[in-house]
Image (cartoon, rainbow, N blue to C red):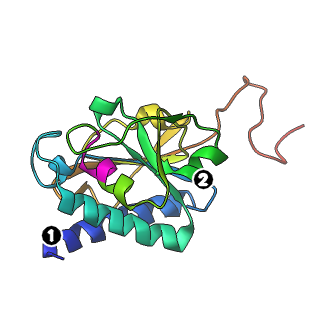
Amino acid sequence: MSLSQELIMAQVKQAVQDLHKVMPLTDEVLLVVGTSTSEVIGSHIGSNGSHEAAEAIFSALTDIQAETGVHFAFQCCEHLNRALVLEEDAAKKRGYELVSAIPIRKAGGAMATYAFSKLEKPVLVEAIKADAGIDIGDTLIGMHLKPVAVPVRSEVRSIGEAHLTMAITRPKLIGGVRAVYEQNCGT
């Protein structure tokens, strides 16, 4: 593994650890991962997908999953309408409808293609409502997050050359001036 792959792995692990500090990542959490491996290696999004960058990111996430149990959904590129790759059991547990397509580098992206090849029982779904997300390279994961998304900052500002954005979600605050949002506050 090259030094750049090691650096990418370290950056991903640090970013997800920072996310974990804000929202504990457990086996109940679904985390959407949007990645432009082109951006990670310093190219324009969608122009130069990198198997090596996808391998490093996936390896780091696999390590995190082994520690926490968190489930990942890997967002495909626009050519598959940003569908998502995840384990079949995670998709079925959440009642997601499966769709028929197999991501490839030019229609799905390098990250989703790599994840599809490495997951035990990969499936593709059209949409999810994830509990949290990590966006590597401005891939626009917001459509796959539950409302309400809350930005999370990391010590890591980028993965390789790609801009990093992360978010957790929280339940909507409903009601008006009389509403109470914490237990044991008011009557």
Left or right: 23, with 80 as reference point:
right
Disc ID at residue 71: none
Residue at x-position 23% and y-position 66%: 8
Q: Position of residue 94 (x, y in %)?
A: 64, 43
Disc ID at residue 4: 1
Which residue, as the protein is rendered here, is positioned at the far right?
187
The stretch in magenta equals 108-113
Q: Main secondary structure of the magenta part?
A: helix
Q: Which image quadrant is residue 68 in? A: bottom right
Q: Position of residue 113 (x, y in %)?
A: 30, 50
Q: Is residue 100 visible?
A: yes
Q: Tell me if residue 44 is in the magenta stretch.
A: no
Closer to viewer: mark 2 or mark 1: 2
Q: What amino acid type should be assigned to the residue bearing mark 1?
A: Ser
Q: Is residue 23 above or below residue 183?
A: below
Residue named by callout 2:
89
Q: Quadrant of the N terminus?
A: bottom left
Q: Position of residue 65 (x, y in %)?
A: 49, 67
- Label 2 close to label 1 by CB (< 8 Å): no
Q: What amino acid type should be assigned to the residue bearing mark 2?
A: Asp
| SS for callout 2 | helix
